[in-house]
Image: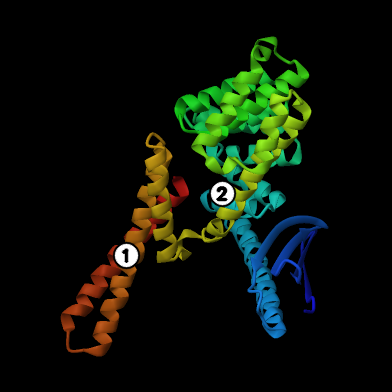
Amino acid sequence: METYRLNSKLVDEDKEYLIKTTNDVSLGTVESEVYINGALADTIVFPHPEQIKPEEVLSMVKSTHGEKKKEIETLLNAYRHMRAEGNPEMMYHLGLAFFYKRFYAEAKDLFEQALQMNPEYHEAFSYLAQVELVYGNVEAALKMAQSAVGFRAEYADYRNILGEAFMAARMYKKATLEFERAIGINLYYSDAYFNFGLALVMNALEREDTELFTNFLTKSQDYFTKAALIYPDYKTAVYEGGIEALKAQDLKRAFSLLKQVREDKKEQHRRKFSPYYMKYALHPQWATERAVQDRIRFLQNEISKNPTYVDLYAELARCYLEQGRILWKKGIDQYRKTLEINPALPRLSGYIDESEKVYESVNRLVKKIAEQG
């Protein structure tokens, strides 16, 4: 079977976005990659059936390429629109869409602009810390992560991110204290257990803290085991290799392999949530009923796992209000259709007028809540 290749180039200000899509005959897949100024940012891979006609593969390459190009154009258009509008809530959500696409420069810009308008936007601080860690800006990452924890000390995620920043700064004692606090907030926080184990191994390599060095082999294996019990997908061949290296006291190899396991989990999480955050890249008034329903189910599930996270409850409340706004508008539209079918219902005109007035009030309130949090 022939190999097909499609390339498209988008230029926005000082950035060049190159989209490359091809099929891999040996693997039976179609792959689309996005490069920003020559650096790989995003990849999607779709398998296709073994028994497939060449023209069907070509069609799949074309459609995959077209969808990816449209996605990038949508993101860039939303980016320009949001910078002009100046809404911190929407900038943050669009920043998430860019973050989960690994478009870190755009994400950083949006998070920073959101913070300029709302200096207490702790979520933006948290994601900025993660962006700075990607860039290797350890000092900036520490500052952002500490700011997030300063606003929400009870958030386990913020503690874990701060711990990762301390690890990057080779401050392993402080890192383990943050992981310990994260576990204290959420006893089933697999990432924090795993990071705790990594910090112990790295401390043993560099001897930053002698207290942590005591019995670190047993302790670190215990933390890795607990992490894998909570999140069984940790237990890959790479994980098993890391544990074997740890038992053999080959610490450099153990840390390298186990850190790869952590990064693989992060990448899996990014790929899972990347399409999800695309739904919320634009203004909430443009949200679809299906998108809001999906978000409600997601938040309900998160609350069941993290019943003390106040912001989850607050966001779920906002989603219910947004859902109510959408359904109210659908009710008005339905009344209009009813009146079109049977104009001999004069009372409906009055109902529609009153409903429109209420809808405008609901619209303003929902927008105000979205902007102010």
Q: Position of residue 127 (x, y in %)?
A: 61, 41
> From the viewer's perspective, is 23 left or right of 110?
right
Q: How many marks?
A: 2
Of tags 2 and 1, the one toward the viewer is 2
Q: Is residue 98 above or below residue 328?
A: above
Residue at label 1? Answer: 359
Q: Quadrant of the N terminus?
A: bottom right
Q: Is residue 91 above or below residue 203?
A: below
Q: Are marks 2 and 1 in contact (CB under 8 Å)?
A: no
Of residues 329 and 96, which is closer to you in this image?
Answer: 96
Question: Which amino acid, by three-letter code, is at mark 2?
Answer: Tyr
Query: Can you tell which mark lies on residue 92?
Result: 2
Of residues 321 and 155, which is closer to you in this image?
Answer: 155
* Residue count near mark 2 (Cα–Cα under 10 Å), binned few <14, some 14–19, many ≥20: many
CA distance for labels 2 and 1: 26 Å
SS at badge 1: helix
Q: Is residue 270 above or below residue 18?
A: above
Q: Does any portion of residue 365 appear in the rendered image?
A: no
Question: Which amino acid, by three-letter code, is at mark 1?
Answer: Tyr
Q: Position of residue 166 (x, y in %)?
A: 67, 26
Q: Residue at x 72, y 36 (%)?
A: 257
